[in-house]
Amino acid sequence: MALTSFKFLLFLTVVLFLYYIVPKKLQWVLLLIVSYAFYLISGVGQVFFLLGTTLVTYGSGLLMQRRRDRYKQELASSKDISKEDKQALKKKTGADIHRIQVIAVVINLAVLGVVKYSSFVIDNINSLLGTAGLQAEIPGFKILIPLGISFYTFMAMGYIIDIGRGKYEAERNFGKLALFLSFFPSIVQGPISRYEDTGKKLAEEHKLSYENLTYGAQLIMWGFFKKLMIADRIAPMVSAIFVPDYQDYSGTLIFVGMLCYAAQIYCDFSGGIDITRGAARMMGIELPLNFERPYFSRSVAEYWRRWHITLGAWMREYVFYPIMLSKPISKLSKKVKDKKGQQWAKYVPSVITPFIVFILIGIWHGANWRYLAFGLYNAVVVAGGVAMEPVFKILREKFKVNVESKGWKIFCIIRTFLIMGISKILVKAPSLKTAAGMVGRVFSNVNFHVFKEIGTYEFDLGYKNYIVLGISLALLFTVSMLQEHGVQIRKTIAGWNIVFRWLIYLTMLTAIMIFGIYGPTFDAAAFIYQAY
């Protein structure tokens, strides 16, 4: 069920009606029922994957909690226990919990890996066997990738790791944990929530609130605007440019395609998240922010703190810091320190760790060499930026660059946007070879006459669509600029005269209904991130 479909709006309306008329203590039960009903619509077989992940997560959490509780009981009942025995008991308990934790995480990762990456691995092994002249071939098999499996798997693993660390106690109510992993607005494309935050909110009682209803509805409408009036309108042009026969287009047109795809993927993904957060907010549930105007970032590292925020936070918490503080990295840093000094040693964790993290981020995005290249590209840029910072600092001082000036800030924003634009070519191009060719063509085939000839191409949107697109992008940019300067748009509008306020709402709603991309060939279900 697409988030931008009439069916979803009708489904949400019915859910909201029932949500606020059932006894408040049963609100979470209703959400669990409707969440699984929502997921069943995507396919009965997919539910078994979600249910299996939930069972493993719930069971492992309880086992770890029971082992920790038993440890506390043993300490309490043995008042005269020696310090050595106490340490041995603590060590054994930690080892038992760690063992359960590792098994649960491996099972969840294995399911994700088989479902999402098995075909990719088998195809590449068969290709290598063929290149080597061997006749052997591993038989392939097709598995339908369950909706949102990457999102709920990461949420499940985060929960398991947190319980293993003793961050909070395991949830003893299976239904409440099941709701956390299956909550219907976020199951499509995130955000990746933490149980200590979202899981608790889902189980709480919520009163009907005019503020929540209006704020949530505004977020949904804004998401519809970004998805239907920008992302889906610009999609045909992007799809036509990113093709194997890219040589038919000049480097300048490919660059325009890159800009268009940057707008498309941002409005598609962030628009979907706005709908998700808006739907949850109407029920009094605050989901974590997932985008914070990433195209205003002054560095690639900042970009990744603003883009897919919950994925970045997950990676920092469960991958980045554990690797950075791990024994192998510490030993390597010590060796570098002994040979090169402290200055070089501090770069070891801050250069190596981003490589591992971004490779994982690339793989998470999809089973394709393009995504691995995407991860490596970001790793090189981020790690390279850290390693070269002393050089950059010297250059800034030599040329007397005022890093606080508006000109420098604008330069950094444009530089970061273009660097990330190249990574988007890697993702969108049909193959890694095509992506490399397209990037090369951008720098080697400049032709500004393309803007005069654009009307001759089959993908030309027509001047009416360009006008709507231009106005929509201008509105998005204006709102983003205001938000970047601390203006809270919805609160500001809420303080205006009720007539003027509702005139704005109705104008936006009418524009979406009239100019949104609908029609016989329209597929609102095709959110770029929903299959991740």
Image: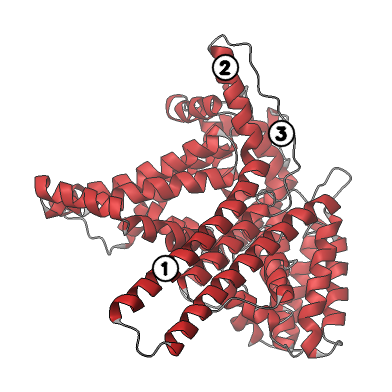
User: From the viewer's perspective, is 376 left or right of 433?
Assistant: left
Q: Which residue is mark 3?
A: 459
Left or right side of 247 for 78 = left
Using the image as rendered, state which of residue 96 and residue 375 is in the foreground: 96
Q: Nearer the viewer, mark 3 or mark 2?
A: 2
- Contact between marks 3 and 2 (CB within 8 A): the answer is no
Q: Which numbered disc, 3 or 1, marks the residue that appears first in the sequence?
A: 1
- Classify 308 as above or below 430: below
Amino acid of disc 3 = Phe
3 and 1 marks in contact (CB < 8 Å): no
Q: Position of residue 277 (x, y in %)?
A: 67, 70
The disc labelled 1 sits on which kind of residue? Lys
**In contact (CB < 8 Å): disc 2 and disc 1:** no
Relative image position of residue 41 (x, y in whole percent): 86, 57
- Would you place residue 284 above or below residue 369 in this image? below
For mark 2, give the secondary structure: helix
The one of 295 and 96 positioned closer to us in this rendering:
96
Q: CA distance from mark 3 to mark 1?
A: 65 Å
Residue occupying the point 84% across, 67% down: 9
Q: Residue 453, position in %: x, y?
A: 63, 29
Residue at screen point 61% across, 21% down: 126
**Can residue 410 be seen at all in this image of the molecule?**
no
**Image quadrant where residue 82 sits:** bottom left
Label 3's element? Answer: loop
Distance CA(mark 2)–CA(mark 1)? 46 Å
Q: Please identify the residue farthest to the top as the structure is shown.
A: 133
Res. 261 visible in picture:
yes
* Residue 196 percent coordinates (x, y): 56, 77
Residue marked by disc 1:
92
Indicate which label's residue lies in the foreground, 2 or 1: 1
